[in-house]
Amino acid sequence: MNKIAEAVVIGGGVIGCSIAYYLAKKGAKVIVIEKKEGLCFGASGANQGGSFVSLFKSPVLELVQESLKLYKDLSEEIGYDIEYQNTGSLLCSIKEEQYPDMEKHAQNLRRSGVNARLIEGNEMRELEPGLAADVIVGIEERESSLLNPFKLNYGLAHAARKLGAEFFLSTEVKKIEINKGAITSVVTDRGKIKTNFVVNAAGAWSPEIGEMLGLTIPVKPRRGQVIVTEPVPLNKRWRYICDADYLTTAFDAEAVKKSKDPRIKLGVAGGYAQENTGNWTIGTSRDFAGYNNQITMPTVKYLAKRAIKFMPKLKDVNCIRMFAGLRPFCYVDGLPILSEVDNPAGFVIATGHAGEGITLAPITGKLISELITENRTSIPIDAFSFSRFKNMN
């Protein structure tokens, strides 16, 4: 294989395939390299397929809002049904001491343009009788969504291929060549590809690609475990529910580190998504176990117990499978890295999405394609620049 491409994308997950699609849409010749035998390998194939708006704050919230705009017509645009559903969501708490923080969080969301409202326990149970009596307060919003993550990944790849993108699976990057401070080619175990741009979208494995160029990319794998139940009747009101402790376990690594609660230490906070089929996915956890993506029973037990605290009816529902995935977590500040580096020219990084790769896939693809083809982006991404790690490189 000796090829020429305007851009080579390393990684066949939702981020890599989204970038390939939006680049191909702009007329760029794109090649995607994936070391595994199929797409959707890492975190892309091990998640709940949801975008939960009320979990976020600036600067990520702005990305989330733009991404959801793209999702609304994405199935029609790419000619592939990704099973997108605008379900809305409920962020709720069983702790009295969290009430003031929830009230403040709802206010901040409204200031950022999110149509969120605070609801107290009795009203919530009138709307959704399945909620536990202990649930005292919640934040409802109507922009959150659920989709099929596998269909998203394959749909983006399908659309990119129709526009001329090529995909090389079971192909490993061995070297990235540079000349006079700029990318010139990518050497794989199947041959060389001449190119001016390389996009590192390798998720939890992105540091390995950075090392080829002497760059330290501050990302490490953060394991997340999920339970899948048998189908049950659809919830009356909310099919996407989250425990307010998620705001700590997902976004406050320092608080997790300091916590003496073994559940919090494992990053367990409830995220419950019910698919159209009636199956619930019960997540989620966050722990650092290297590249070990095995299920662990202590974590699964915490997940199950936490779910029952919020929805007691799940106590009698059977589990049909469990899975775990490795999320690319930026251990410096928890923010994504969306940036071209200063040296070498032409090396672009799109990683560090943590557990929000599905949520941010469309906007990441759009922004990275703009960065490469226009040398600018339609919304500011300075907060996600690789230059913030200059002391490490």
Image (cartoon, grey):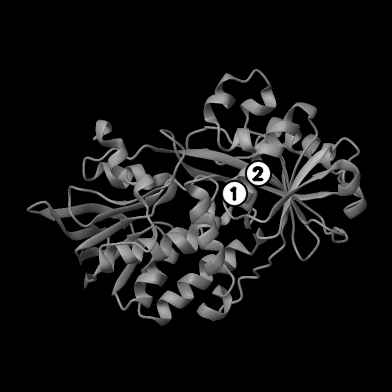
Q: Quadrant of residue 19?
A: bottom left
Amino acid carrying label 2: it is Gln
C-alpha span from label 1 to label 2: 6 Å
Position of 108 compared to 98: left or right? left
- The residue sitting at 20% across, 48% down in the picture is 342
The residue positioned 17% from the left and 50% from the top of the image is 344
Disc number placed over residue 107 in the picture, else none? 2
Q: Measuring 17% from the left and 47% from the top, which residue is drawn there?
A: 343
Question: 189 or 277: which is nearer to us?
Answer: 277
Residue 12 visible somewhere in the drawing: no
Which element is circle 1 on? helix
Say if 22 sits above or below 234 in the image. Answer: below
Tell me the quarter of the image containing the N terminus: bottom left
Q: Which mark is residue 111?
A: 1
Depicted 325 relative to depicted 96: above or below: below
Front-most of residues 181 and 210: 181
